[in-house]
Image (cartoon, rainbow, N blue to C red):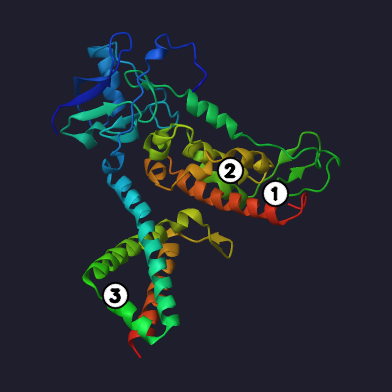
Amino acid sequence: MTDRPEYTEFHPRWYRPRMSTYWWLRRRSYLAFILRELSSVFVAWFVLYLLLLVSAVGQGATAYRRFLDWSATPWLLAVNLMAFVFIAFHAVTWFNLAPQAIVVRLRGRRVQRRRIVASIHLGWIVLSVLVIWLVMGR
Amino acid sequence: MPDHITLRVTRYRPEEDTEPGIQEYEVPLREEWAVLDGLNHVKDHLDATLSYRWSCRMGICGSCGMTVNGEPKLSCAAFLADYAPGPVRVEPLANFPVIRDLVVEIGDFMSKLAKVKPWIIEEPQAGRGDEAGGDREVGRGGLVGGDTDEHLQTPAEMDEYHQFSMCINCMLCYAACPVYGLDPQFIGPAAIALAQRYNLDSRDHGAAERLDVLSQHDGIWGCTFVGECTRACPKDVDPAGAIQRYKLTAATESLKAFLLPRGAK
């Protein structure tokens, strides 16, 4: 747009609309996108939390007990609950977008989008059940 | 169904206005009328000073893109009956400078489109006409011998890019894209989708040339996958899908360039 066309007589008076700072509140899909971006912060927090857990386990029983007590404090429970909601949102929204980014072919035919989404969700559920069984079932 | 509907049209007359205003027009509400028919009625019978672009009236020329009730739409495909009882807000396409009324300046898109070389780039000097009437070869730009070479393509090869070839350059995806709205340097959804249309074409050999343009910061990596371009597209092109797929290609190429010795790519 640096080239100034000569065909518009009033071209210096083009009206250039500015995007509002709150553009992401204008449409539900924009808001969902911003929330998905924001969820990355909670993913980062979850990674940090996991590393702290591993570190506590590595330091022995006392450190692990201290970590558990710290995790049971109300504010940390609230943070982790919020993190869980955002991470679930992060996972579901990205799983739903996956077929747009990857093309899967089986026997020369392109696999339908909903089948890709369904298989990813199924894999997620199976893994989650397995982890829950490992942690709680024994 | 009421027999009239109000169009609330954004007007901007640069010779007298400092910013756009709203003007209302009452137009007949007919089942087969689209917003464009309403605007044509205004132009022909109510107010000849109203400016807007249109041409084919059948969703193929891509000229009549406007913002209808806040959504980027082809005004020839947005039926008045779907907005009854109204009023219907008709604004110029978002994210573009407004020249007059509903007419936006599209020079930026046109220059970006040319940058991605949306045409078939032939393989330099390779196998063209060296054996007249030679082997018939189909696949990856297969040629039938002779100087009047034909490029053969299987239906499966055409399916690879067919969806992306449906783009009509209507720019609704640019109007829907907040990344383009915030950073006009972003090359944008349609240009990338059209680059993919040629990259995925078995007859084309220009992928490397396009990679230079597309892998820049303002190319594919500007896209944050809002996905709104795909929802706005009236031709089901899925520009968001094209961009994400191309990100994978570009990342693979960068990795190859990093790991493999020069010339082995």
In the rendered image, the vertical position of residue A116 relative to residue B218, given as above or below: below
Q: From where the camera sits, is residue A59 visible?
A: yes
For this orientation, the residue located farthest to the left is B2
Residue B120, percent from left and from top? 65, 36
Q: From where the camera sits, is residue B234 visible?
A: no
Tell me the quarter of the image containing the N terminus of chain B: top left
Residue B247, percent from left and from top? 54, 50
Q: What amino acid does circle 2 point to?
A: Ser
Q: What is the distance, in whole Å, between disc 1 and disc 2 at their CAs?
A: 24 Å
Residue B260, percent from left and from top? 73, 56
- Determine the residue positioned at 71% across, 45% down: B141
- Determine the residue positioned at 43% across, 68% down: A119
Callout 2: SS: loop
Marks 1 & 3, CB-CB < 8 Å contact: no
Q: Nearer the viewer, mark 1 or mark 2?
A: 2
In this image, B53 relative to B245: left or right?
left
Of residues B179 and A95, which is closer to you in this image? B179
Residue A101 is marked as none
Would you identify the image quadrant in which residue A87 lies?
bottom left
Residue B215 is marked as 2
- Neighbours of disc 2 within 10 Å: few (<14), some (14-19), many (20+): some
Q: What amino acid does circle 1 point to?
A: Arg
For this orientation, the residue located farthest to the right is B131
Label 3, on which residue?
Answer: A70
Label 1, on which residue?
Answer: B140
Would you identify the image quadrant in which residue B77 lies?
top left
In the rendered image, the vertical position of residue B261 relative to residue B97, given as above or below: below
In this image, B176 relative to B258: left or right?
left
- Host chain of mark 2: B
Callout 1: SS: loop
Q: What amino acid does circle 3 point to?
A: Trp
